[in-house]
Amino acid sequence: MTQGSNRIFDDFAKLASDATSVAQSVRKEMETAVRAQAERFLSDMDLVQRDEHDAVKEMAAAARDEAEDLKTRLAALEARVATLEAGSGSAAPSQSETPGTPPPGE
C-alpha cells in the first residue's frame, strides 16, 4: 500500500507541475494578446510618440522666446521713432509720403 500511495503522490505532483506549466503558458499568451490589442487601440487613437511631443514642446518654447525678443525690439524701435519724431518736430510721414508706397487711389 505504501508503494501505491507514493505512486499516487508522484502522479499528483506531476499533474500539479504540468498544470503550473500550462497556467504559465496561458498567462504569457494572454499578456501577448492584451499587449497587441492595446497597441492596436493606441495606434487607432493617433497618439503622438513621446519624442515627437518633446520636439514640438521645444519648438514652442523657442517660438515664445523669439516672440518676446521681437516684442522687445519692436518697443525699442517704437521708442526710437517717437524720439526722432519729437526731435524733428514733425508728425510721422503719411502713407503717400512714405518711400516705396504708392499714393492713395492706385
Image (cartoon, rainbow, N blue to C red):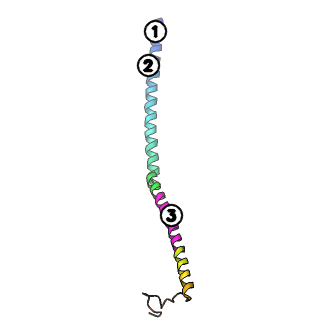
Residue type indicated by callout 1: Gly
Answer above or below: position of 98 versus 50. Answer: below
Answer above or below: position of 99 versus 35. Answer: below
Residue at 53% across, 82% down: 84
Mark pair 1, 3: CA separation: 84 Å
Residue at mark 1? 4
Badge 3: few (under 14), some or many (20 or more) residues near its Cα, within 10 Å?
A: few
Q: Main secondary structure of the magenta part?
A: helix
Q: Farthest front residue?
A: 87
Q: Position of residue 85 (x, y in %)?
A: 55, 84
Residue type indicated by callout 3: Asp
- What's the magenta region? 56-75
Residue at 50% across, 60% down: 61
Mark pair 2, 3: CA separation: 70 Å
Q: Quadrant of residue 11?
A: top left
The local secondary structure at tag 2 comes to: helix
Location of the C terminus (image quadrant): bottom left
Q: Quadrant of residue 101?
A: bottom left
Residue at mark 2? 14
User: In the rendered structure, are the residues bearing label 2 and label 3 in contact, judged by CB atoms less than 8 Å apart?
Assistant: no
Q: Which mark is residue 45?
A: none
Q: Position of residue 20 (x, y in %)?
A: 46, 26
**Residue 67 lies within the magenta run:** yes
Of badges 1 and 2, nearer the viewer stands 2
Q: Is residue 16 something one can see in this rendering?
A: yes
Of label 1 and label 3, which has the lower sequence position?
A: 1
Residue at mark 3? 65
Between 88 and 78, which is closer to the camera in this rendering?
88
User: In the rendered structure, are the residues bearing label 1 and label 3 in contact, judged by CB atoms less than 8 Å apart?
Assistant: no
Badge 1: few (under 14), some or many (20 or more) residues near its Cα, within 10 Å?
A: few
Residue type indicated by callout 2: Lys
